[in-house]
Amino acid sequence: MPNEHILIVEDDEAIQELEAYNLSKERFRVTRVATGEDALRKLKTDPFNLVLLDLMLPGIDGLEVCRTIRKNPATESLPVMMVTAKGEESDIVAGLELGADDYIVKPFSPKVLVARVKAILRRKKKTGTGPSGQPVEIHGIAIHPGRHEVTTHGRAVDLTNMEFRVLQFLAERPGWVFTRYQIVEAVRGENYPVTDRSVDVMIVGLRKKLGKAGETIETVRGVGYRCREEE
């Protein structure tokens, strides 16, 4: 993973220096900009492996930068990690719904920052452009898309079609956090009516059917759900 190129978009000089120093120590190549406008210009001229994106920026804010990245075919699959101030749950949800891959809340531990960056890049290498549709095994759960079967430690689990698709969606992207809307959009398509309660009820049922293995599906308070990564 060394020498991968990271674009830091941060207007606070002290935080920008903190991020750059700790990522450089891990042998990442780092480019720093302080505005959303400069970030979008850089993305047009230089190749990057990940964008570390502050949300509160002068001029074009981080959400708009993320939206522009996802609309551009040249950068639509570029990993984006948001950096947000504590308590901005609505911005976290908005960013994830725009396609951000992860987020970290200020103030943050440099070690946690580096670990999260490495995790995103590792997932990107493992998954490429998206899930393969191949069998998935994680935390004792085995998912066989072709046979539409799920087992936990060898025990067959009877799931509804929606439960199966939600489990497959999360398990193929371990560690990624998804909002309730993102989950339904992914498994049923856009514009499908969804409420927080309906997704929550489905997750509760899925966990119950999976038994102890259901702990693999984690709640991220104020945001949504994820499948826990294997260590």
Image: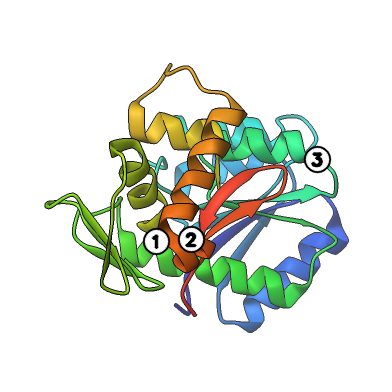
Amino acid type for the residue under numbered disc 2: Gly
Q: Residue at x 35, y 25 (%)?
A: 189
Q: Residue at x 41, y 40 (%)?
A: 76
Indicate which disc residue 202 carries: none
Q: Residue at x 39, y 61 (%)?
A: 124
Contact flag, marks 1 and 3 (Cβ < 8 Å): no
Amino acid type for the residue under numbered disc 3: Glu
Label 2: how many residues lie within 10 Å, few (<14), some (14-19) or many (20+)? some
Label 1: how many residues lie within 10 Å, few (<14), some (14-19) or many (20+)? some
State the CA–CA distance, disc 1 to disc 2. 25 Å
Q: Report the residue marked by disc 2.
A: 214
The local secondary structure at tag 1 comes to: helix
Q: Which is nearer the eye, 171 or 54?
A: 171
Q: Position of residue 231 (x, y in %)?
A: 49, 80
Q: Report the residue marked by disc 3.
A: 88
Q: Position of residue 120 (x, y in %)?
A: 50, 63
